[in-house]
């Protein structure tokens, strides 16, 4: 799973139960739409998230209509699991210097 996908999942978990729109990710995470929307599409396709279009009139809002996404029950369980696994895997990782003198 990519770092970008993990970051998106983390944002969903933190926002629960509030749904998030693509603009929320772009503004808060500085993730580009060309990276974000394929991630959202894949997560929706496998059932981790569900998207619904807002019903307010875009003309009255003064902006394009937004699609809001929220984690499904399955998605929440799998996201928490994936994030926990990632944390466990990276906690034991220590960076090594690119040059380490040979032992004396």
Image (cartoon, rainbow, N blue to C red):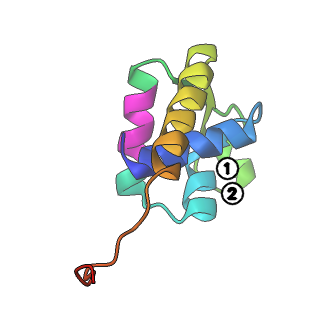
Identify residue for label 1.
Answer: 59
Extreme residue toward the front, this view: 104
Question: CB of mark 2 within 8 Å of CB of mark 1?
Answer: yes
Tell me the quarter of the image containing the N terminus: top left
64 or 2: nearer the viewer:
2
Mark yes or no: residue 34 visible: yes
92 or 57: nearer the viewer:
92
Badge 1 marks a residue whose secondary structure is helix
Which residue is drawn at the image coordinates 47% and 18% (left, top)?
47
Which residue is drawn at the image coordinates 42% and 56% (left, top)?
33
- Helix, strand or loop: magenta stretch: helix
89 or 103: nearer the viewer:
103
Quarter of the image for residue 83 reads: top right
Tell me the quarter of the image containing the C terminus: bottom left
Count of marks placed on residues: 2
Q: Is residue 93 left or right of residue 87?
A: left
- In the image, the segment drawn in magenta is 37-43
Mark yes or no: residue 51 visible: no
Q: Which mark is residue 62?
A: 2
Quarter of the image for residue 87 reads: top right
Q: What x and y, as percent, mark residue 102?
A: 22, 80
Which residue is drawn at the image coordinates 53% and 23% (left, top)?
78
Q: Which mark is residue 17?
A: none
Q: What x and y, as percent, mark residue 8?
A: 53, 45
Which residue is drawn at the image coordinates 55% and 27% (left, top)?
81
Q: Is residue 97 above or below residue 18?
A: below
């Amino acid at each position: 799973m990519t770092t970008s996908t993990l970051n998106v999942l983390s944002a969903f978990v933190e926002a629960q139960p509030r749904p998030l729109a693509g603009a929320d990710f772009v503004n808060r995470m500085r993730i580009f739409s060309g990276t974000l929307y394929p991630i959202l599409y894949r997560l929706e396709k496998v059932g981790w998230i569900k998207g619904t279009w807002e019903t307010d009139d875009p003309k009255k809002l003064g902006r394009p209509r937004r699609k809001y996404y929220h984690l499904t029950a399955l998605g929440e369980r799998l996201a928490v699991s994936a994030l926990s696994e990632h944390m466990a895997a990276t906690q034991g990782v220590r960076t090594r210097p690119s040059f380490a003198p040979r032992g004396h």
